[in-house]
Image: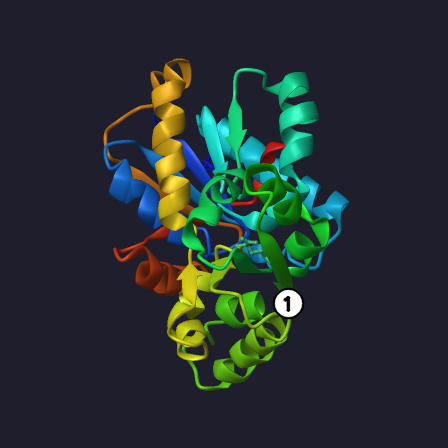
């Protein structure tokens, strides 16, 4: 009898890891490769367990930390959580407890702080709306972070729990999506007529951006995070040469997902990434 050989794919080099619960993080990844094209990257979408939005702190931390450790195993010295829900509910524990204990030489960054640092620059009326998952909104993370950088801003929040399921199931461009887009926008805009800027505080939501804009008055700015997070990463790498120097730069990009239907992932991912995506299925729990 011949021996069995099990091929487990490993990424090569020391790529930057980009993580999201599903396909939404591709909206951030796209901006990152535009601003930092030379680096190697791996993208991991935990589509098999998405959405994260309604899950507990404990579960989101557990899932996110499993994915982050899997990315460390692939050689990533640095992982960006391109997910607001994971940034709101898992990042602090990872940075303050998990990394010092197990991976003191690695870094994990989120998307909330870089966004809070600049969002006040977009508004004239000083009243903004923040749209996010239930987890992100209930965590109060944006209220706390924005208060820190722009204490004069009035921040109105609205959870949109049905938007991520619509997007993950490929319904984001269908007419039925309009009903749910309008539902949450109406609830937000009823909070104040002076909101002139709306932050899409979920990396999935840019996929609904055209529909969102169509339901709002023309003077309301709709701000997505991709370019903001990418600029902040450029700045981070300039300031942290000890991390930057460990990253490999051959322009290689690999995509992984925890859902076994990689064909559906590839189809949607290619549309949002604006380039062909060919992903591989991984079981991140195997590495723990
Ligand atoms: N893209 C994630 C975010 O930015 C979506 C979370 C989810 O899976 O519900 O919050």
Q: Which quadrant of the view contains residue 154?
A: bottom right
Residue drawn at x 46%, y 56% is: 24
The spot of residue 160 in percent (x, y) is 61, 67
**Location of residue 159 with respect to 149 vertically, above or below:** below
User: In the depicted view, which residue is nearer to us: 69 or 16?
Assistant: 16
Q: Is residue 212 left or right of residue 85?
A: left
Q: Is residue 272 left or right of residue 204?
A: left
Mark 1 closeness class: few <14, some 14–19, many ≥20 residues within 10 Å: some
The spot of residue 110 in percent (x, y) is 53, 38
Q: Is residue 100 visible?
A: yes
Residue drawn at x 62%, y 36% is: 91
Q: Which quadrant of the view contains residue 58?
A: top right
Disc 1 target residue: 161
User: In the depicted view, which residue is nearer to us: 258 or 114?
Assistant: 114
Q: Quadrant of the C terminus?
A: top right
- Total labels drawn: 1
Toward the top, the furthest residue is: 242
The spot of residue 148 in percent (x, y) is 60, 37
The spot of residue 26 in percent (x, y) is 40, 52
């Amino acid at each position: 009898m011949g021996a069995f050989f099990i091929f487990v794919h490993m990424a090569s080099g020391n790529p930057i890891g980009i993580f999201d619960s599903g396909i939404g993080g591709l909206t951030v990844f796209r901006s990152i490769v535009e601003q930092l094209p030379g680096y190697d990257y791996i993208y991991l979408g935990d589509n098999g367990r998405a959405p994260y939005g309604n899950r507990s702190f404990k579960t989101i931390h557990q899932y996110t930390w499993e994915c982050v450790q899997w990315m460390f195993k692939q050689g990533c010295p640095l992982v960006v959580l391109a997910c607001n829900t994971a940034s709101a509910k898992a990042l602090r524990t990872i940075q303050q407890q998990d990394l010092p204990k197990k991976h003191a030489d690695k870094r994990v960054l989120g998307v909330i702080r870089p966004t809070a640092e600049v969002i006040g620059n977009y508004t004239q009326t000083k009243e903004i709306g923040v749209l996010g998952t239930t987890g992100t909104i209930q965590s109060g993370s944006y209220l706390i972070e924005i208060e820190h950088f722009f204490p004069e801003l009035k921040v109105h929040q609205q959870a949109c729990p049905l938007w991520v399921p619509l997007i993950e199931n490929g319904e984001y461009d269908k007419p039925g999506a309009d009903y749910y887009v309008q539902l949450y926008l109406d609830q937000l805009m009823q909070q104040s007529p002076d909101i002139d800027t709306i932050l899409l505080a979920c990396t999935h939501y840019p996929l609904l951006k055209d529909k969102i804009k169509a339901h709002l008055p023309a003077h309301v700015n709709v701000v997505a995070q991709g370019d903001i997070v990418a600029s902040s990463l450029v700045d981070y790498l300039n300031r942290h040469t000890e991390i930057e120097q460990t990253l490999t730069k051959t322009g290689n990009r690999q995509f992984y997902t925890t859902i076994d239907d990689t064909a559906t992932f590839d189809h949607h991912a290619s549309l949002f990434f604006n380039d062909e995506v060919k992903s591989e299925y991984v079981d991140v729990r195997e590495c723990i």
